Image (spheres, helix red, strand yellow):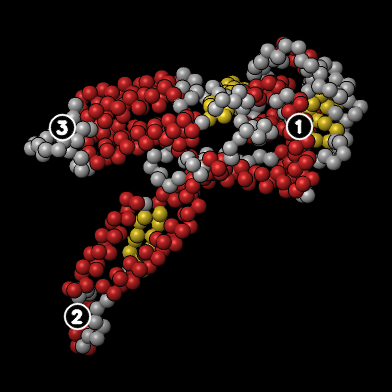
Amino acid sequence: MSWSSLTSMIRSYREALRQENTSPLVLARMYEEEFKKDMMALKVVPPAVYMRVTENIPQIVAFIEGIISNGHAYATRQGDVYFDTKSIGSRYGKLVNFGNAAEAPGVRDKRDPRDFALWKASKPQEPYWESPWGRGRPGWHIECSTIASSVFGSQLDIHSGGIDLAFPHHENEIAQCEAFHKCDQWGNYFLHSGHLHLKGSSEKMSKSLRNYITIKDFLQSYTANEFRLFCLLSKYRSGIDYSDASMSEARSTLFAISSFIHNAQAYMQGHLLCQTIQEDLLWERLSSTQASVRTALADDFDTPKTVDALMSLIYHGNCQLQPITVKVDKTSRSPAVFGAMVAYIREIMDVLGVDLLDRKESGVADSSGVLHNVVEQLVHFRTKVRNFALSVDDEVPQDLQNSVQRQRKKPPVDRVPLLETCDALRKNLVPLGVHIKDRGINSTWEITQLQRETTDKKS
C-alpha cells in the first residue's frame, strides 16, 4: 500500500468514527463481527484463535524495545520509533527490489528514507496508548510481527497475503522479526495472491475505489461453493476478472461435478442401467488422475490443472454411464470403480473447500433453526402415533395379571401398520442426516450434519 492510500484509509476511518459517534474499539468490533459473518457465509474455516492488536499493546511495546536493544531501531525527539534499515545491510529487500525509496511527506528525523515506523506519536483525535516514548500507537507492520511471534515463535513456515503487501508490509515484517529474533530467515515461504478485478477494470476490487460487490449481495446470486470454484479456476498468484461469464463457468463446472456424482450413485444403486462398463479403463484413468492431481498441487498449488484433471476423469466416467433403453439380460455391473471415483472426487473437492456432501448453501444457512423446529414437530407427531399404536388394554383380570406381565405386550393387529409406518419414517430420515432413537415411550433425535459443522467451527 502506498503512503497516499494509507493516509486516505486513515482519513476514512476517522470520518467513520466521527459519523458513528462511537469509540474506536466498539467500531472495530462491529466490523470484526461483520467480517466473521461474511467468512462463515463463504464457508471459510475460522482460525484457531483471533488476535487483536488492541489486546496486545504491551507485547508490541516489548517487541519494539527488543529491536532497539539489538541495535536495529531508534527513537526520535518527537516520540516516534523507526527501524534502522542500514543496520541489516543488504538483507533488507528480500522480496522486492524496491530501488530508491522516496521519503514520505512530512516525516522528519529519519536516518534513511527507507526507515519505517515501529511506533508513532499520537496526533489529535487519534487513539493512543502509553509507551516509554510517550503516548502513541503501533506502526503498521510491527503489529503482525509481534502477534505472529507470540503465536508461532521465532520462525514461520508459510506466510500468505495479497501481492500488494509484498512491499512494504511483508518486507518490513521480515526485517522486524529477523532483527528481534536474531535470525537469518524468519519466514520460509511467502505466498502472494493476485487481486480480484471487475471485468474490464485494471484496478483491484477495493472499498476505497467503490468498485466492489459485497459478499451479502454476491450470495444473493451465487453460492459459496460456486465462488470457491471461481477462485480455483485461476492460479492463486494471478489476478482474477470477476464477471457474470466467469461465474457462469464456475457454476457449470460445479453442476457437471454434481451431476456425475448423482448419475454414478444411481448406477451403483441399480437405478441406472448401462451397457457393460470398461472397468479396466476407468481404474487406469482414476490412477492417472490421482498422479496428475498430486503433481499439480505440488507445483505451487496449481488448482486450475487440478480441476482439469478431475473434469477429465468425469468425462471418461460419463462416457461409460450411457443409459440403455432396452433391458439386457446378464449385463455385468461395475459399481466398485464408480464408488472409488466418487470418493476420490469428493475427497479432493473437500480438500479444496468445496463440500459436495452439504446441500445447504450459505443463503439458507440461517434456516437451521427453522429446520430444528420442523424436525421437533415431526418427531413429536410420530411419538404420539407410535405410543397410540403401542398402547394396549390395561384392564386385565387380576388372576391373569402376573402372567400377562411376564409376556411382552403386543399391539393390536389393526395398529401394526402404524408402527411399520413409524419405523419406515425413522429409516428414511437417516440418509437425510436425521437420526431418531426410540427410548420406551419417548423418542430422541439428532441432525448429524449440523453437529459436524459445529464441531468443524470449534476446531
Location of residue 386 by image quarter:
bottom left
Judging by the rendered image, the residue that carries numbered circle 3 is: 275
Q: Residue 157, how many percent across, how many down? A: 58, 25
Using the image, tell me which numbered label, if any, was put on residue 8.
1
Q: Which residue does the image show at 82% across and 16% down from the upper left?
A: 112
Task: Indicate the secondary structure of the residue bearing disc 2.
Answer: helix
Q: Is residue 90 shown above or below 67?
A: above
Q: Amino acid at mark 2?
A: Ser
382 or 183, nearer to the observer: 382
Q: Amino acid at mark 3?
A: Gln
Q: Residue 371, how many percent across, how many down? A: 43, 57
Judging by the rendered image, the residue that carries numbered circle 2 is: 403
Q: How packed is label 3: few (under 14 Cα within 10 Å), some, or many (20 or more)?
A: some
Q: Is residue 453 shown above or below 76?
A: below
Q: Which residue does the image show at 30% across and 32% down from the upper left?
A: 341
Q: Earlier in the sequence, mark 2 or mark 3?
A: 3
